[in-house]
Image (spheres, grey):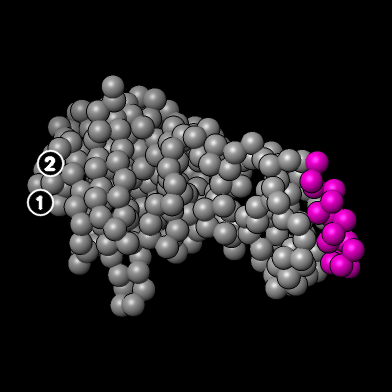
Amino acid sequence: MQQTILEIKNLSKSYGETIALANFSLSLKKGEVLGLLGPNGAGKTTLISILSGTLRDFTGSASFKGQDLFSDRRLKNLIGIVPQEMAFYEDLGALENLMFWGGLYDIPKKELKRRALELLAVVELSARAKEPIKKFSGGMKRRLNIAIGLVHQPELLLLDEPTVGIDVQAKVNILDIIRNIGQQGTSVVFTTHQLSEVEQICSRIAIMDKGVVLAEGTLAELIRIVGEKEIVEVSGEFSADAFSAIIRQSDGNGMEILSVTDNQAHLAFADSERIPAMMQHLFKHHLPISDLKIKSPNLEAVFLKMTGRSLRD
């Protein structure tokens, strides 16, 4: 049985009247890659900031390896942080940056250099080790950022949207690195607002919005929340109010409305044979529909069910 390495209980944080976290609770096991999935403003960065010790004035608790994370400073040396903002010196090379940041953890110089060279190979930057970072591409900088977070061999790695602003190939490389980190036994908390990313690399997923966890589990466990239903995505030049009014006039037996916004709606049908009748009802009322897609239950459908809106809203 995997050991619980991180236990978060009832973390709450507000900025004035804006609630960022509301009694947020979550646990993480050793070697687990946990994806925190939520839209911008869900509270993901606030959580990472609290756990990394850069944000105060909150309530609640967090224990790491059974000890109070916020009172034992020595525990910080067992945690790696990869923030959204790049954390390195642009005029220095990749190896120099790793040696500088690793030096803050009192690692013997010979061991630190060995570790730095090893990490440069892991993030595929060995050939550019001495080149100034200002010449690096966005994807290379993101990979170096992860290497810096790992240089002291942490037992827990916190990554705050590490794939923001990079191309597809660079994103694939970074996701591979994160997956391998978990397989080697390091626990990872990985925040994102990209469904595909958590589907690809996370052993467990937590859906959060407005500072709370709405659902958590493996991908298969989350999909079971929706059940064996057909998901219908309806797009067109209609308002949310117009669509809702027409739906209310129908026989909605066996149908669930997952979300309705201007120009798009998502419906779930327990019986796929009811889909044609519902579509006929919409067309009968001259709803301007431009596209119709039928999908199997997936993580997007779970997010729609839990939040009532698309992740991109």
**Looking at the picture, how far across and down is residue 219, in whole percent?**
51, 35
Q: Helix or strand or loop: what does disc 1 sit on?
A: loop
Using the image as rendered, state which of residue 183 and residue 141 is in the foreground. 183
Q: Can residue 301 be seen at all in this image of the molecule?
A: yes
Q: Quadrant of residue 234?
A: bottom right
Residue, disc 1? 71
Identify the residue at horizontal 68%, vertical 55% (top origin).
Answer: 266
Give the vertical position of 55 relative to 133 (above or below): below
Give the vertical position of 252 relative to 41 (above or below): above
Using the image as rendered, state which of residue 92 and residue 79 is in the foreground. 79
Residue sticking out furthest to the bottom: 16
Identify the residue at horizontal 49%, vertical 35% (top origin).
Answer: 221
Residue, disc 2? 67
- Quadrant in which the N terminus is drawn: top left
Amino acid at the residue labelled 2: Gln
Amino acid at the residue labelled 1: Ser
**Looking at the picture, how far across and down is residue 313, in whole percent?**
59, 63
**Looking at the picture, how far across and down is residue 80, in whole percent?**
28, 42
Identify the residue at horizontal 12%, vertical 41% (top origin).
Answer: 67
Label 2 crowd (10 A; few <14 / some 14-19 / many >=20): some
Q: Quadrant of residue 224?
A: top right
Using the image as rendered, state which of residue 172 and residue 293 is in the foreground. 293
Give the numbered dot on residue 230. Answer: none
* Residue 283 within the segment the image draws in magenta: yes
* Residue 274 within the segment the image draws in magenta: yes
Q: Are marks 2 and 1 in contact (CB under 8 Å)?
A: yes
What's drawn in magenta, residue-wise? 273-288
